[in-house]
Amino acid sequence: GCGVAVGIASGEEGRREEAVGMKGLLEAILKDIPAPAVHWYGGSNEGGNGSEKEEGDFEVEPFSMTATTVGYDPYLGRTCTGRIYSGKVRMGDSITLLRRQNEKDDEENANDNNSGPSAQVTGVFANRGISRAPLDPPFACAGDIVTLSGVPDSLKVGDTLSSTKNMVPEPVDTPPLAPPTLSCLFGANNGPLAGKEGTIVTSSRVRARLMSETDNNVTITVEKCESDAEKTVVLGRGELQIGILVEQMRREGYEMIITPPQILTTTHPVTGEKLEPWEEVVIDVDAEYSGTVVNALTGARKGILVEMMDDTHGKTRMKFEVPSRGLLGFGPEIATATRGTAVMHHCYLEDREYAGMIGTGTERGKLVSNELGKATLFALESLSARGTLFVAPGEMVYPGMVIGENNKSGDLEVNPVRAKATSNMRTQAKDEKLYLPPPKKMSVEELIGYMSEDEVIEVTPQSVRLRKLELDAGVRERAARTKKKQMDALKANAKGGKK
């Protein structure tokens, strides 16, 4: 009585209803599921969605198609993939770009329809499995999902392509893309071990690779750094996206350094107050760990619990609204706290008032090497009592490199290359049986959320290291004293303002 077609079969018993199988299933889909409706500008119905149309009916309809994904092919040039909204397109047709109507567009841009450059379609392709094949004959009608080559180079996701001779009255309404929420600086590796593991080490090559990434990855924006000509600014939507890009580049032979992420803030046009991006976070977790998740997000990370639901299978779904800054480093932390049972999804919500100082509540100091050489088992065994180690015996270390996490607050300068003194004294064999726990290895995205403001990630094809931005211990100590004085002055001014 619910209007749902049901097919029943049993593999164990070897029985099935008539016409049930892969062929019967596909026939049932064609029979019971209605065909997708397409827009019909010349249709008589008010909704604009025509019923079944013949191929010849699309000849008089204006062609329109929204760009769902944009890519670049070295042989075909700029490509665009999407579903044809109306009309028909064939190879050789002239098409015009219509810019997406943005809420921030002024009236002048809205009046001229935001029309852009024109181009000629050089190919019509469709996906066949995991490959892309040209259509024969090379045309497609409304409702088809196709890839067009020869589109304008300035095409962006959400823009509309329309036939030049029979243009649609306005661009197709599409949802806006989520803006980037954080930025990182990429630069050439300038550490003591630079050039020993990678083949592409110059800042110009790194920048060229990042620029080429924007041809096929529309969610990443790359800009030149105004303060440092040797560095490049990469804008993304989270540490995972930045981490994936870095992993791709290191496998191609690049060496680089990545600075700590900075959240992209804006200013309210009317009040002038500082705004920052907030995200909607949905977490599914076992009910026994729900309190742990709530405490982790609503405490120092400044999150707001919006909704909480329990199901009959012992799971709890929670919805939060959290500043993007509060999500940095949250994934690995909550995975450990919930024994891997938490499943998290987050997406951009809106820009809101700046939430103030945010901390994870777990800030600790670092163990920083003060010598160059290979780490020894003898030295690391004694250092393991002071914190969690990031390096194993035999790995190269250098002054300023972070080799572990300190159990106490504040950084600690240590010597991980110290060797056992050799002498003719004979002792028991207990000194030979040194036990060292395995080092903690973190991926690039984990390090992006973990590193402090005065640290950078050094990435090579073989290694991922965390080190201080300033390798000289004396310079770091003077900078720390200066920063402490500034923080004390800010606290004093805050107390004076309250009085």
Image (cartoon, helix red, strand yellow):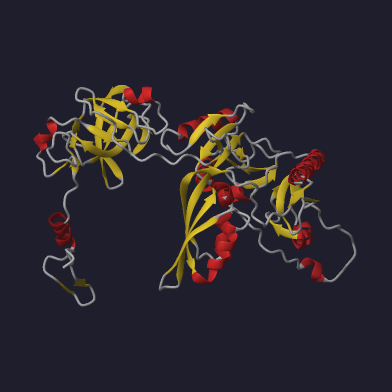
Q: Residue furthest bottom?
A: 13
Q: Residue 223 at x, y = what percent?
A: 53, 30
* Side of 9 where 387 appears, left or right: right
Q: Residue 231, can we see it?
A: yes
Q: Quadrant of residue 198?
A: top right
Q: Which of 323 and 423 lies nearest the eye of the viewer?
A: 323
Q: Measuring 81% from the left and 53% from the top, which residue is drawn there?
A: 418
Q: Is residue 113 above or below residue 475?
A: above
Q: Is residue 197 above or below residue 100?
A: below
* Side of 393 where 229 appears, left or right: left
Indicate the quadrant containing the N terminus: top left, top right, bottom left or bottom right.
bottom left
Q: Residue 294 at x, y = what percent?
A: 55, 62
Q: Measuring 12% from the left and 56% from the top, which residue is drawn there?
A: 31
Q: Measuring 69% from the left and 51% from the top, which residue is drawn there?
A: 395
Q: Which of 383 and 166 lies nearest the eye of the viewer?
A: 166
Q: Residue 230 at x, y = what percent?
A: 62, 28
Q: Residue furthest front?
A: 499
Q: Which of 363 and 109 lies nearest the eye of the viewer?
A: 109
Looking at the rendered structure, the number of numbered marks drawn on it comes to 0
Q: Measuring 81% from the left and 67% from the top, which residue is drawn there?
A: 431
Q: Residue 263 at x, y = what percent?
A: 57, 41
Q: Quadrant of residue 148?
A: top left
